[in-house]
Image (cartoon, grey):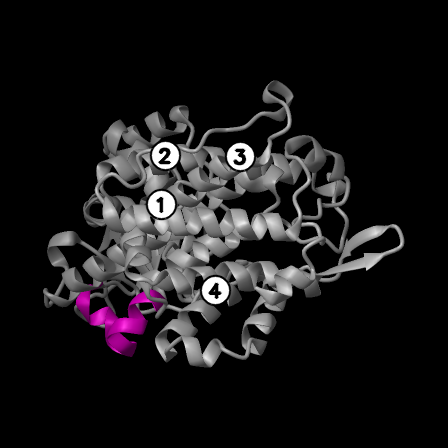
Amino acid sequence: ASVVLRHKNYPAFLGATGEENTLKAFVEPISLEKNTYLLLKVVTELHEEFGSNPEKAGDENAEIHNPSENGRMNLGVYKKFLKNNFRRVLPQSFKDAIARMTAAELAALVLAMEAGKSLAFKQEKAGFVKNSVFPHLSSRAVLHSAPGFSDCFDSPARERLRRAITYASRYNNFGLVRLPVDLELATRACRQWTELMLASPNELQVVSDEVELFGIISLANLNFARIFIQEIASLRHFENAEAYTSGTNLLLFPMKKLIEVLYQAIDISTLRRLDELVYLVSQKQMLQEMSIGSKRDEELPSSPFRILRPIPFSDIKQLAELHDISVDVLKDWSSLRVILNSFSWLARRVGNSSVPDSSLVLALMRCQGISPSSEGSIISKKGMVPLRGSRLRQHFGPSWQKHFIYVDAVTMAESNEDLGRLMGLGARAFLDEEDDLGDLEKD
């Protein structure tokens, strides 16, 4: 707190290059001291709300503020805007984890994030400028330098605070930052909030969309991985699912079976919200790609991970006919595949062929013959999803393939006509694929 008070006249935010006027038009000027006070009020009120009435916490939706219609926000309106967005980026299990934390931990999180701006911002003659594109690392430095940090918090609390601040940004100079797999729910929840604290007010709505989406898919991925691994471990083989591996890093899994697991990992109301967020975030990212030429080289993109765009309805109807899957299921798959893609479950190639955006393929596989001189049988399967075996290797070791049906070669077709042509070629359809041994891409 003393660091914030010593720099109380510092600005709470500095607009991105070319967006200074947008920030000024969005909210009235906020000093570092005032913003810290607002954030402390927001997190302590939400902490009390989550603990006292967890069933109803989160009923409100964040309101989109359009400064051209409503004028510039005052501090009272901005506080409500903050609170709505801080609430909505937390799934219910994250809210429960926040409720179990102490108010002192949350206060320390806010103070560290805001005090870090004393290092990240620099005052020059023309005004304040950004001294770093990673202000959260400055916040971590301030946290470590606080004399009472070790005395006031036990080891688990200190680790939660450090990790929540360290991973506040999911992007660095080298690309996407992968979060540690052992992050507990409380740390993940705090990390959601620290990412919002990095956003300028005029960016908060769109950043909150992406952070809310990340919270949903990260929690769904944890549930999916747990259920999927348990399903595999409970059976000696997956013959009933007709899942195939070619002995490489590729697993071909039927989408109808895969989506059953995904339905267990996410409830229907969250799935419908996922539909909305996938559309909103993918639209935002498409607009960013169109204007990327106007960005300065030294500024980092605001979107650290790419979201698969929704499958157009015209394509869904074609896929339904091609793979014999209902349109409603494919609509759900359009959003659910974002979970798998964001956490590297989906393979990008089958042999020499690129997997389509739908992640559904017509698979052509060759089973080993009884004798060395025989060509073996060739089988085809519709509605298959290429998955990376490396995710299963992490749980089952190098012998993960024993859980599935083995084929000695695999390729893919993009249409029934293409499939018929490959079937006509017989064993020759796999000649090019054998040189590459299927999909050899590694994580």
Q: Does label 2 or label 4 sit earlier along the sequence? A: 4
Question: Which quadrant of the figure contains the N terminus?
Answer: bottom right
Measuring from the top left, give residue 411's x and y in whole percent. 37, 53
Q: Are marks 1 and 4 in contact (CB under 8 Å)?
A: no
Residue to which mark 1 is pinned: 337
Front residue (pair 354, 271): 271
Disc with the residue nearer the chain's start (2 vs 1): 2
Report helix, strand or loop for mark 4.
Answer: helix
Amino acid type, label 1: Arg
The magenta span reads 390-405
* The C terminus - image quarter: bottom left
Tell me the number on the disc at residue 107.
none
Q: Is residue 323 above or below residue 187?
A: above
Q: CA distance from mark 3 to mark 2?
A: 32 Å
Which residue lies under the disc numbered 4? Answer: 108
User: Which mark, residue 76?
Assistant: 3
Lower sequence index among marks 1 and 4:
4
Give the main secondary structure, helix, strand or loop, of the magenta stretch: helix
Q: Nearer the viewer, residue 116 or 355?
A: 116
Where 402 falls versus 345 (above or below)? Answer: below
Disc 2 target residue: 275
- Residue contact between numbered discs 3 and 4, judged by CB atoms under 8 Å: no
